[in-house]
Image: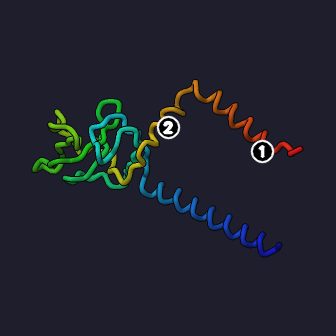
Amino acid sequence: MKEQNKGKALLQSVAALALLAVIGLAFLLELRPVVILSGSMEPVIPTGSICLISGADRRGVPGRIVAYELQDHLVVHRISSGASDGQTFITKGDSNNTADPAPVSADQIRGNVIGAVPYLGYVVLFLSDKKVWIPALAFIFLWILGCFQRKS
């Protein structure tokens, strides 16, 4: 029995260390999740995906998928070419026929896309609706309550 407790404690310690490592890596890479709302980057990044944007490296490199600020929102597109000054870039969505209308300055780039989780953005958008929270919390409360009731 004591061996089981030691194994359980070891597993919990490893899980806690793994969680700390992931949080530390996210901090070092300046990760930021972004929900993709359009199909301009399909099929590489499907609509409804969550992209992880790393702000640690904001260099504009042709071929790289970046997130750049445009007025009050982020746009996730691929850099198709750079100007000779190295400070402005032409971007384009992979499924778009034409390049974006305005060049992107190096100051607008917020980071590079380092990964995407398809369709998870739909879940995030659903849960961000305040009308969903009351029934969701009620369901979770009742489920937890049911877990602790004694079986007759």
120 lies above or below 6 = above
Question: Residue most toward the left?
Answer: 84
Residue beneath disc 2:
124
Q: Is residue 32 left or right of residue 45?
A: right
In x, y percent, where is residue 134?
A: 65, 27
1 lies above or below 82 = below
Residue 1 in which image quadrant = bottom right
Question: Dot 1 surroundings within 10 Å: few (below 14), some, or many (20 or more)?
Answer: few
Foreground: 95 or 83?
Answer: 95
Circle 1 SS class: helix
**What's under tag 1, amino acid-wise?**
Cys
In x, y percent, where is residue 87?
A: 18, 47
**What's under tag 2, amino acid-wise?**
Val
Which label is found at residue 147?
1
Question: Residue most toward the top?
Answer: 131
Q: CA distance from mark 2 to mark 1?
A: 26 Å
Query: Which of pointers 2 and 1 lies earlier in the amino acid sequence?
Result: 2
In x, y percent, where is residue 109?
A: 29, 44
In x, y percent, where is residue 23?
A: 53, 56
**In which quadrant will I find the C terminus?**
top right
Which label is found at residue 74?
none
